[in-house]
Amino acid sequence: MSDGRREILLAHGGGGRMTHALVRDLFLHAFDNPALAPLEDAARIDVTSGSIAFTTDSFVVSPVVFPGGDLGKLAVCGTVNDLAVCGARPIALSAGFLLEEGLPMPLLESIVASMRRTCEEVGVKIVTGDTKVVERGGLDQIFINTAGIGVLAPPLPSGAATVRPGDCILVSGPLADHGMAVLSARNELRFDTTIESDCAPLWDLICALLAAVPNGVRWMRDPTRGGFGTVLNELAAGRDFGIEIEEAAVPFRPEVRALSEILGIDPLYVACEGRVVVVVEPGSAELALATMRSHPLGREATQTGRIVCDPAGRVVLRTRIGGTRIVEVPSGEQLPRIC
Ligand code: MG
């Protein structure tokens, strides 16, 4: 940086010379593209005719670097995936950086580089942004907000209203890796595990899936905060159908199962950041699974359950020993600052 210091100072957020240097030397350099380059108050983006999808999310994960990813990768994947599960091709993101005074500059640089790499992977651009700095202790190191715009073009999911009994519930891979990887990286725990976050941008996988079964996908959701159990409850709540999942078919890695048991956490409610839950009409299930399995991010895709008539509005887990239990909506925040 032109000031010669290697940490964030309050002046980096002051709007003056140091702010301009930070924007020019770090953000503009990393994210360089024609919509961002003029540094106007708003980016101008060309869109094709039709509809866009628009979403926003804030990322406060702790620690900011974890096995399999970091805050930067997460901040791009989270917003890209929210667009993708709606069937929208991500085209533009904003990035709002909230920085704590004293944040080491190399850490910020590595997070920005990670955002850039993930954007390149997806083909999405960061076209506008903002930086604020708060005094030491005002926040924990760095938070990032990303908003995203995606273009909606057929084939699209037919929507939650079209879900009906007989439909199949697929997941693109093992669940809960992200949340357990972040937990295992926390200082107070320091578990020595091999669990890595599943954090990944899903647009390419979802695009392939929609193309393969253009009329077969009813509904998709990325099981982030609250995990698979929460997503299924959100789908079933207030509806005239229920959801039945098979315990033996819900994919968890052995390490995730083991750490969940040690910590007394139900991995059904633990976040993923690179998985998608897909409801497909029964005739499309086989092709949908094969399509996902042929993609690097969906190799371990599996069918975990189906939409049933009873009990309406509820999610039921059929256990390995043949019993059933209701998968409740979790009360309160189980795992703070996972994403
Ligand atoms: Mg989501």
Image (tube, rainbow, N blue to C red):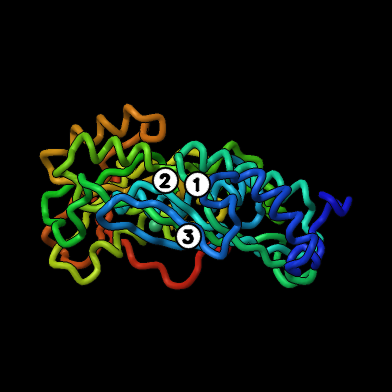
N-terminal of the pair, mark 2 or mark 1, is 1
- Label 2 neighbour load within 10 Å: few <14, some 14-19, many 20+: many
Residue at image mark 3: 147
Q: Nearer the viewer, residue 317 or 100?
A: 100
Q: Is residue 32 visible?
A: yes
Q: Is residue 88 left or right of residue 109?
A: left
Residue at image mark 1: 125
Residue found at the very far right of the displayed protein: 4
> What SS does tag 2 mark?
loop
Q: Nearer the viewer, residue 301 or 32?
A: 32
Give above or below for 251 relative to 46: above
Residue found at the very far top of the displayed protein: 294
**Residue displayed at 20% across by 59% down:** 160
Q: Quadrant of ligand 1?
A: bottom left
Q: Disc 3, disc 1: CB below 8 Å? A: no
Identified by mark 1, the residue type is: Lys
Q: Is residue 268 visible?
A: no
Measured in 3D between alpha carbons, the distance from the residue under mark 3 to the one under mark 1, in whole angstroms, is 11 Å
Residue at image mark 2: 175
Q: Is residue 132 left or right of residue 11?
A: left
In the rendering, at what x and y percent does residue 195 appear? 56, 40
**Residue displayed at 41% across by 41% down:** 174
Numbered disc in front, either 3 or 2: 3
Identified by mark 3, the residue type is: Ala
Residue 12 sits in quarter: bottom right
Label 3 residue near ligand 1, CB within 8 Å: no
Measured in 3D between alpha carbons, the distance from the residue under mark 3 to the one under mark 2, in whole angstroms, is 25 Å
Give above or below for 250 relative to 38: above
